[in-house]
Image (tube, helix red, strand yellow):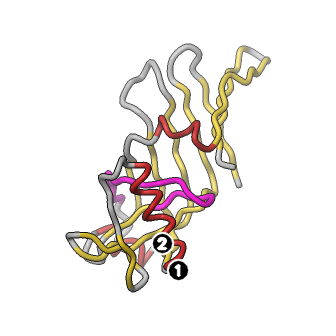
Amino acid sequence: MPGASCFLRDGGDIFHTYSAYARGLDHTDFAYAFLDMTALGRPHVTPLVAVWAEGALHFCTGAEEQKFANLRVNPHVVLTTGCNRWDQGLDVVVEGDAVRVTDEDTLRRLAQAWATKWDGQWQFTVRDGCFQHEPGAAIVFSVTPSKVFAHAKGDPFGATTHRF
């Protein structure tokens, strides 16, 4: 089950201050920033929408987009989500490898997850191992976390890291 916990260090004492699991993390999912590397080793960052389902974060991209070109060379990515306030909320950083999803049963479940998560604003059908929508085909990737950082902001501030 996905989760995030935050801890506060006070001198030599460490206090568990906050935990959220599965649907409890939904309040962090406003949108995501996606970081990958270009073929020349330069960072590339772009906003995107994603969903947490089946033990991983999932996102999609077009075959003509920079994300797709970068992923063909290097699958290592970072996705972040949270809010722009410094004094409240929870920021989450997920590191892992992006793996293409082509199984159509899985894609149908993910399409439903997108529609539910984003209040029907992202509607996809499934065909040819991709999402299909008005602009065309969207290639779906799954990122199973290898490392997650969670940063609580406000009173109390805290941070934690989990490696898988």
The quarter holding residue 71 reads bottom left
Query: Is residue 93 shown left or right of residue 111?
Result: right
Q: Residue 59 got which mark? A: none
Pick out the residue farthest to the left: 135
Of the 4 image quadrants, the one containing the C terminus is: bottom right
Which residue is more in the foreground, 77 or 47?
47
Residue 111's place in the image compared with 155, above or below, is below
Give percent across and percent down for residue 135. 20, 70
Left or right: where 121 falls relative to 115: left
User: Is residue 20 shown above or below 59?
Assistant: above
Q: Say if residue 39 shows up in the picture.
A: no
**Residue 107 within the segment the image draws in magenta:** no
* Amino acid type shown at disc 1: Asp
Foreground residue among 43 and 141: 141
Evaluate if marks 1 and 2 touch, with contact meaning CB atoms under 8 Å apart: yes
Which residue is at 40% across, 32% downward?
A: 83
Q: Is residue 11 left or right of residue 126?
A: right
Q: CA distance from mark 1 to mark 2?
A: 6 Å
Name the residue: 55% across, 32% down: 151
* Image-quadrant location for residue 85: top left
Query: Residue 103 shows which numbered tag?
Result: 1
Q: Position of residue 26 (x, y in %)?
A: 50, 40
Figure check: 89 above or below 65: above
Q: Which mark is residue 107?
A: 2
**Stretch of the chain drawn in magenta:** 43-58
Q: Secondary structure at mark 1?
A: loop
Based on the picture, tell me whether residue 57 belongs to the magenta stretch. Answer: yes
How many callouts does the rendering have? 2
Q: Residues within 10 Å of mark 2 (few under 14, many from 20)?
A: many
